[in-house]
Every structure is written in C-alpha cells, then in structure tokens.
Image (cartoon, helix red, strand yellow):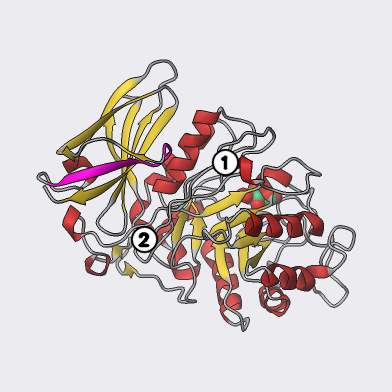
Amino acid sequence: MAPEIQSLFPSSTAVLLLLGACLSAAAVAALGAADDASRPAVPLPGGGARRVLFANGLGLTPQMGWNSWNHFQCDINEAVVRRTADALVATGLAKAGYKYVNLDDCWADYQRTKEGYMIANPKTFPSGIKALADYVHSKGLKLGIYSSAGTRTCSNRMPGSLGHEDKDAKTFASWGVDYLKYDNCYRDGTPETVRFGRMSRALKNSGRPIFYSLCEWGYMEVPKWGGMYGNSWRTTGDIIDTWSGMLDNIDRNDAYARYAKPGGWNDPDMLEVGNGGMAYNEYVVHFSLWAIAKFKCSVLSTHARGKSSLIDSSSCVPIVFGADRMGVQGNKVKKYGNDLEVWAGQLSRHRKAVLLLNRGATRSASITAAWPDVGIRRGVTVEARDVWKHETLPGRFTGSLTAVVGPHSCKLFVLTPVPR
Ligand code: GLA
C-alpha cells in the first residue's frame, strides 16, 4: 500500500532533501483504465512486442534511493556514503522505500590493476567497496555502483567497462553490489544495443541479482528496447537544475510513458530538489512531476559538504507515493494553451493522482481536471486529498475538479472514489 509520507518542510537552510517520489498505481478497472495484465504488449518497429525480457526479478517498482552525482559530482568518499546510509535510516526514508545508496562516477582508481581489475580509489574509498557494501547492507539498504559502456567513464577519472564486462560484473557481484548505473561515454562506435546488451548478459551471469540502470541518454530510442536489457533507461540527457531544464526532461520522458512497466522504467534523470537552481515552488513541481510519472525515484543529496547528516528531519520534502505492483506511468493528459496542464496517473485502490500544473511565470490560473481527461468514469464521485497540504478538500467532486494554481506551481491531488 502506498504510504504518503508526511513532511517536513525545510526550516533549515542548505538542505531540502529530496526524495524521489514514486507513485503507486494499481487496480484500475473502476476508474476506466485497463488492467495491466490485459494490456497489450507494446509493438516494436519491425514486429514483435515488448515484454519485460530482462527477467532478473528486480525493478518491479521504480528504484528509489540516493545517488551521489547531482550534488557531489566527483567529490565523493566513503564517509559521505556511510553518512548518507545512516541518514536514510534515521530520517525514515529507508522505511519509506529509499533503499538504494548509489555511487556515481569517480569511485574507482584511475586505472585498472595489472590483472585488469577495477578497484576503488584508495584515497577516497580506502576500505574498498566490499566493506562499504557490508556497511550499507548492515543498515538494510542496497549499494549501487557506476561504470560506462566505453573505455572510460564520463569524468575520465576512471576506467569504463567496455571489453571488460564479464570481469567487472563478477567483481561487482563479489563485492555485494546491488545496482549498476551504466553510462555511455568513451564509446567505440558500436551501437548502444550491443554495448549495453553485453553488460546485461554479464550481469545476468554474475551470480548476483543486480538492478541494471541504462544511462544511454535516450539515444536510439532506448525505451523501445531498454526493457530487453535492463530495469530502467534514461530517456534524456543530464538534467539541468533550472525550471526549463527540468520541464524539458519530463516532457521528453512523457513521450515514452507507454513503455514503462514493472521490471523496466523510463528514467528522466535524478531529482535536483534542494540543489539550489530553482525556487521552492518550482522544486515542488519537479518533485510532483517525477512522482506522478512514476520513475526512477533517486533521492539526491543536497546536504552541504561537511555536514554530518544528509538530511535532517527538519529539512526534507514530503511525498512519497509508495510504488506498488502495477506500474503505469502517469502522464500529461490535457493542455490548455501553452501554460496550463493536467497530468494523471493510476494509483492502487482505484485512486487517481492528478496534477494541475501552471507553467506560466506571471499569473495564477484556474485549472480543471475533467474526468474523461484523467480517466475517471463520468458519474464517479471522489474525495480529493491535497498531497502537499496533507489535507482532504471539503466536499466531494463529480465530473471534474478545479483549483487555482500559482505561477510556476502545481497542485497534486489523490482522488479516491466514494459512494454517491
Ligand atoms: C553522465 C551521466 C550523469 C553522470 C555523469 C558522471 O553525464 O549522464 O548522470 O553519471 O555522466 O560523469
């Protein structure tokens, strides 16, 4: 069941943590959507149909956790990662589903060993990755690692895995790694499907279930084939911590909504919430859109360097829609002019998540979610809970819900059918 995590808005400065949020989705019939099992497989160009073929049993709900890149970039070390794991537990985020603690670029030594192994950077990760995985596991969390389908990673500070897929996958497995983000830098001209496919097979043969996150940037229309090889795939280039950059990523990702399902997810890149490039209300929109579109829900660290904890309880953002069994990515269902939009996504227990978005910069506007647009049958009556305010609106709604939304802001509701 989807816990709605209450929140705590930042009283303190440097930090808004971020939780990636995931929307739950599930049984749908009453609201007029199709049941997942009855959904046709997605046709592929040239015939065939996409099923989730990368059957490693992982990613039945979108991944949720923390990743080092958007905040720390290459400035990571084992102390930061351990503190992050501690903070995920202490703040209750782990309990809410934020289980992955993911290293991004720059964790490894500059070159492979003479024997051809990747090893942790001895200066920043002196205890090694196995010890870090043990620590993270001792907290009930999972450890993620990073490499590239090229000769080097994007930072050029460590080797990539091209040509070393089996060795690296087995090494990661032997350390107890649970997740691999696989990037696309320093490639050799071989198509993505080949290079990302090689690592997919290597992970399957590694002896350990490892969540496989393709970071292919949306080249080669990855949503159409990513599910054959991995558990999620980036649909876009790197997110930029600005209002327009954020919207650009989510719009691109939205075009592929139908390819997301349990076992394989579209990924519009990690949250920037709290990193400073957007206003508070814009981060609320960022968080809400990522939640409703049900992605990859990477939490991203926003704590100031040197602070002892990533998140303190007075500094985090609210919502988590716990992910559940059925994965239907919410999407944009209605546009009014250039600025006003309605997004909707299916939730468990016949509920709908509905987001009213005002992209305009200057004026508040009244936005209506009409039942046919959001996929609710005409006669159905609902109660509406304002997710960010944590309160249920007075009265009941039949046919539509209208609210006034400020500039660069949104309102996010959960609609629950009630007897008339
Ligand atoms: C690429 C990826 C980013 C991050 C960096 C690390 O740009 O898309 O998410 O992993 O590399 O160098």
Q: Which residues are magenta?
A: 380-389
Question: In this view of the protein, which residue sits in the foreground, 17 or 346?
Answer: 17
Residue 325 at least partly seen: yes
From the viewer's perspective, is 149 left or right of 171?
left
Above or below, 327 against 287 in this view is below
Residue with the mark numbered 1: 239
Q: Quadrant of residue 212?
A: bottom right
Q: Residues within 10 Å of mark 2 (few under 14, many from 20)?
A: many
Disc 1: CA contacts within 10 A as few (<14), some (14-19) or many (>=20): some
Hey, which residue is sitting farthest top in the picture? 362
Amino acid at pointer 1: Ile
x%, y% of residue 72?
73, 46
Indicate the secondary structure of the residue bearing disc 2: loop
Q: Nearer the viewer, residue 137 or 32?
A: 137
Name the magenta segment's main secondary structure. Answer: strand
Q: Measuring 69% from the left and 35% from the top, which residue is drawn there?
A: 14
Whether residue 103 is visible: no
Mark 2 — residue? 327
Label of residue 28 in the image? none
Residue 119 drawn in magenta: no
Which quadrant holds residue 166?
A: bottom right
Q: Earlier in the sequence, mark 2 or mark 1?
A: 1
Q: How many marks?
A: 2
Quadrant location of the N terminus in the rendered image: bottom left
Residue at x-position 37% and y-position 46%: 255
Q: Is mark 2 within 8 Å of ligand 1?
A: no
Amino acid carrying mark 2 in the image: Gly
